[in-house]
Amino acid sequence: MRKRFIALIACGALAATSLAGFAGCGGKTDLTVWGPAAQQESLKEMVKLFKEENPDINLSIGVGVCGEDQAFSQMSNDPQSGADVFAWANDQVANLYAIGALSPLTSADVTALQSRMAQSTIDFGKLGSKYYGYPYSADNGFFLYYKSDVVSAEQAKTVKGVLDACKAKKVKFIVEITNSWYVNSFTFGAGGTYDLVRDETDGTIIKEVQVNFDQKAPESEYTYGQLGSQEVADLLHDSTVVVGADDVIDSYLSSEEVGAIVRGTWKADDIKNAWGDKYEATILPDWTSSLDGETYPWYSFAGGKLYGVNSYSKHVNEAHKLAAFLASDKMQEKRFDDNSICPASTAVAALDKVKANKAISAFMQQQTHSVVQIAMPDNYWSEGDSLGTFLKTFTGTATELQTRIEQYVTALKNAATKTN
Amino acid sequence: MAKTVSQLDYLGMSGWQKFCYNFLQFLKKLPVAFLSIFTVWIPKFARKIYNSVKRFFLTLWNAARHGDWKTRMSFLVMGFSQFSRKQIMRGLLFLVFEILFIIYMVAFGAAQLSMFGSLGVRDTIQGGEDPVTGERLPTVVGDNSLLILLYGILTMIFIIAFVYAWYANIKAAYAVQQYVEANQHLTTAKEDLNALADAQYHKTLLAGPLIGLVIFTIFPIIFMVFVAFTNYDMQHMPPNKTFDWVGWANFKSLFAGGLSGGTDFGRVFGKLLLWTVIWAIFATFTNYILGMIVAIMINKKGIKLKKLWRTVLIMTIAVPQFVSLLLMSQMLADEGALNMLFGTSIPFLTDPVLAKVTVIVVNIWVGIPFTMLMVTGILMNIPADLYESARIDGAGPVRMYFKITLPYVLHVTTPSLISNFVGNINNFGVIYLLTGGGPSMAAGGSGGAGETDLLITWLYKLIQDKKQYGIASVISIMMFVLTAVISLIVYNRSKAVKNEEDFM
């Protein structure tokens, strides 16, 4: 009898504590935020600052790792259990939208952004007629790094100058030109364009792919694609050029056999450390076509990174508040201080300390010679890689090249959604 | 063309002629073997189905006609016949199953099944903002086609199980009646339970594996077959957007050729299928032959330090395979260690042809030790007197190899050769870790497929990067058919199965 009584009391106590536990959960706002691995420390501090600024909300914020480029593959596993707030690169907007992982901004949010940054930057997060993210960085593009004792500032203005300078010192020029991110950069420079017409209400539907690579450039007997791709092929057949990604750059930097590199801001620190005071960065050089002898600029992509809110989040309002906070001017400045991340806000970009950063100022210069990297369909990348593979061994005539370009354009245009 | 030659002519042929003759005979038999699927297997199967359907209705008819009222009640209330004749536990099990089934169907299954035809109609409505107040609106989550499909299939399996249980119930009900009428003993619950540990022990033992097989193998395959008939892809990602049935559209885009969504699936599939088969043949037989040669060399009398050689080769097994492969991929890269060392720029992994060769060669390096181990064991088991008597009869080493060693080894290892071959068709690890499928195909419309991609790694790309679940399912069905047909034909024709008693 006594034993049973004790058991009863124990059960009662257990029930009471668990009930109390539930009651405690009632007013709490649980949020999860995903950011890139390199910015974890900084992100945790930002979350702390956010909590301090919002003492009226009972916040509990978890911080997880997910690179901006990994946002889609992470979220697509199960968007309903993904993070409430997460960082993503702007080329993933269509994919993230397709799985319903992005909560749109209200017009008030957009107006607030417009006072702080250029419209082209805000457009990173645009799909159809709506905006889906708070840009915090506009650093996705490539430009030229060069070593001042190999390449002079004058030589860095043309591709030929860079190549000659590198050849003279028997060092290499590294550019990952067969990669789909770079492979059309000359074609865009020659005047090629690529654009998508998306459905206004359903952003996943691509109504039309507008691409002119197979059309003749004005006052030229060659097409944009011929001009640009021939230049890629010429570079690939030049023994001074090395095609390689970050690991290749690292190994050449350590053996000091490289004089110029085309890469984005993420490689700035490594290159700076290797070259010391000989480290320079500038806009991409102009190039002269071997086909028509004309000189054209070399274009980069321009893209950025944003914080977005999961539309399945249980606390959408608080999540938007956090996302906006993480992309605020103050946090962009903090991110520049902590990780040298190129800011998206015009006010932060205008700060003297930001301007003093060579890589970021080269990137800013490059903006005039850039194509905004819209949310390309997946086949833009796979077709680009295929073209890169083709050009590696291509030694044929301009007519043969045009056949391949036409094939390329047909495949690109086929990404338009079929309407039955 | 080889004709069927007489025994005498055959014996008169040289070794090479015999080999060619046998090979041609094999090729000649191949179409017949394929045709036998239609002429023998399918009619056999149809007859079997017809018989079981006949039996099904006959049993029902007999029970309805000759059964008493208790047996007839069992048509409605499962287990009634057993129940009323004091076989409580059996009756109770049937009844509980019926009640569970009805509850499941009413509460859940019927609703899921009713949506199975459309796979859901409501898309998720994204929050957005209230046009008047500017406030954020909550997201309204729509139908999840994936779950509807999943639960629909589950419900169907449950219904089939129920029909079977119902049939078994009536059969048993009538049997129980007959037992009682003949004054035979009815088993009690205790006897039934005891039987499960004795006469029916095989059922107890096999229940676990069977359930596991159904849940983890058969159910996913059924699910995959259903997905092959839907447009589950990037444009239709549940719960954001529902996907629908599209009939044979995925099969058409795979076999009819032409671009669909920017990718020429037909061409890529053909190309990768060819390379997959070439790869599987090379990967299997190079390892097999070279491994055997190494084993024989080490096993030969007079070779010193046998243990050392074996240990050295087995070291490659001791290092996890993915580590060696990743290291290899680093070493062989365009600007990798090997090229740096020799100051060359050989595109080991980036030239379409060379990459294929590299992949096969690296696979040899990884795979030989396994074959060597296996063959060493077999070689040690071959009775020495066979060789002795052969030597006395004047046979040379080559003849002894082809007459004694090879048949012996082949006999034992054919099943493992088949599993190796099928395993190589699906050898994801080596390709993915070494080249990642690269280099990209140079032709347009390749949809991200690379030159060294096997069907399985392409499948991975289609699902992981492009979320093309529909067409990926079609490809996996094709791969399933391919591997199943190859395994069945070769396995059934192999000596290990035909002459199981030999060499024993």
Image (spheres, coloured by chain):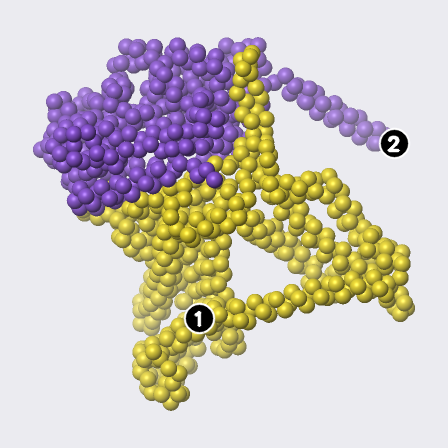
Chain colours: A purple, B yellow
What number is the disc on residue B31? Answer: 1
Name the residue tied to disc 2: A1
Circle 2 Cα neighbour tier, 10 Å, few/some/many (<14 / 14–19 / ≥20):
few
Q: Tell how many labels.
A: 2
Chain letter for the residue marked with disc 1 in the picture: B
Could you tell whether B247 is left or right of A162 in the image? right
Tag in front: 2 or 1: 1
Amino acid type assigned to the residue bearing label 2 in the image: Met
Label 1: how many residues lie within 10 Å, few (<14), some (14-19) or many (20+)?
few
Residue found 55% across the figure and 44% down from its top: B245
**In the foreground, B494 or A286:** A286
The quarter of the picture where residue A372 lies is top left
Q: Secondary structure at mark 2?
A: loop
What residue sits 33% from the left and 84% below the top?
A: B13
Asked if residue A68 shows in the view, the reply is: no
- Give the quadrant of the N terminus of chain B: bottom left
